[in-house]
Amino acid sequence: MTPDLHARHRAVLPDWLALYYDRPIEITHGEGRQVWDADGKQYLDFFGGILTTMTAHALPEVTKAVSEQASRIVHSSTLYLNRPMVELAERVAKLSGIPDARVFFTTSGTEANDTALLLATAYRRSNQILAMRNSYHGRSFSAVGITGNRGWSPTSLSPLQTLYVHGGVRTRGPYAHLSDAEFTEACVADLRDMLGQTRGNVAALIAEPIQGVGGFTSPPDGLYARFREILAEHGILWISDEVQTGWGRTGEHFWGWQAHAASGPPDLLTFAKGIGNGMSIGGVVARAEVMNCLDANSISTFGGSPVTMAAGLANLSYLLEHDLQGNARRVGGLLIERLRAIGASTPCVREVRGRGLMIGIELVKPGTDEAHPDAASAVLEECREHGLLIGKGGGHSTSVLRIAPPLTLTVAEAEQGAAILEQALRNAS
């Protein structure tokens, strides 16, 4: 059945629509951290639909909320009052840490980032954007224009003038040899120098606290707080892209920006993926002055759908009531240490990095510092053969394995996944 479906897929969908595996699989159902394909094979899911199935597959609380809401009304649009949307917005605004917050719901992280760029450029009356090297913010025309990763940037055309800043990648690049403090000071000096080259009135800096598609890289804690001090001198806004880091996935913090909190919260925060546990929810949080700066009417036909909002409310309640952030910290910490122990004796592993249940394993050709995308593909394939689904990404060449299971992962499942990864990594070396 799957080969036929693959042929049909290729016949009717774009060539550039990526598929994992030499023999792509059709996932038909899931439960907890497990999924099954069309042939009945079971897998431990360490990627959660690209960090989207945040709590668990077929979580009863979420499926019940969706079913009950769908039985009442599925859609109305933002032209009408929507109780689930207001209730979720109230909770997200409070959790965001942004004072006098307003929330606008979208259907994806791409659309959320697109909206944040619209708000920032309108508020500042400038199309100049600072973005981080190695970044990824979505696939829309404007989001591609600020993506600092050539593998996900299919055109150089853009409505924005984008300037790329150092700092998102700690262990590669011209500052990699510096201490954390020296690295931060070098990136701050680079930012000051760059701002001296602009025409002034730059709109915003957009940054992922941990770069997702870029391979789960991050700067030293506090870097964006130092950046924020300089941005504030110029009135430049800070957009924190929390599409992958939000909702407690890093374990240590509820939002990624909180590792850089010394200078206060961001002006805008974007979110998506995990909040819907598979339902299409994205959004922007901004202080009211920024959110309300638009002088034209706008709506969202599908953003804030009663069904997706009901799912988001149920999912957020489950996450908070069961302390999934704490579970990500505890189980993720054990998993990272286990993977680091494996990496220390595996020649192809350059680095195991990350926080909580957001872990990257960077692969290189043994004895060198050269990225090894073939090994990453081989490990991906072997893990699949042995019942483990993982992701990959990373910089100029896709050589980082991405580990991001649902936040309900158990210690036993973490050990099961690590054992499969260990064998695949040793075979790749």
Image (tube, grey):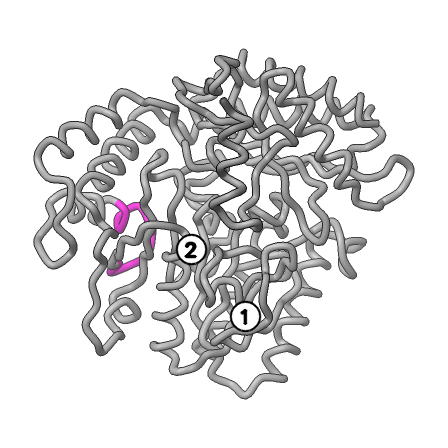
Disc 1 vs disc 2: Cβ atoms closer than 8 Å? no
User: Could you tell me which quadrant the C terminus lies in?
Assistant: top right
Q: Residue at x 67, y 15 (%)?
A: 419
Q: Residues within 10 Å of mark 2 (few under 14, many from 20)?
A: many
Q: Amino acid at mark 1?
A: Leu
Whether 426 is drawn above or below 248: the answer is above
* Residue 62 image offset from top left, x and y in percent: 26, 28
Q: Amino acid at mark 2?
A: Thr
Q: Residue at x 26, y 48 (%)?
A: 94
Residue at numbered disc 1: 130
> Quick check: 160 left or right of 381?
left
Between 364 and 42, the residue placed more toward the observer is 42
Whether 391 is drawn above or below 427: the answer is below
* Residue 239 image offset from top left, x and y in percent: 44, 62
Residue at the limit of the structure toward the right, as seen here? 367
Q: Residue at x 50, y 78 (%)?
A: 128
Residue 110, which numbered label?
2
Q: Which residues are magenta?
A: 92-101
Residue 95, which numbered label?
none
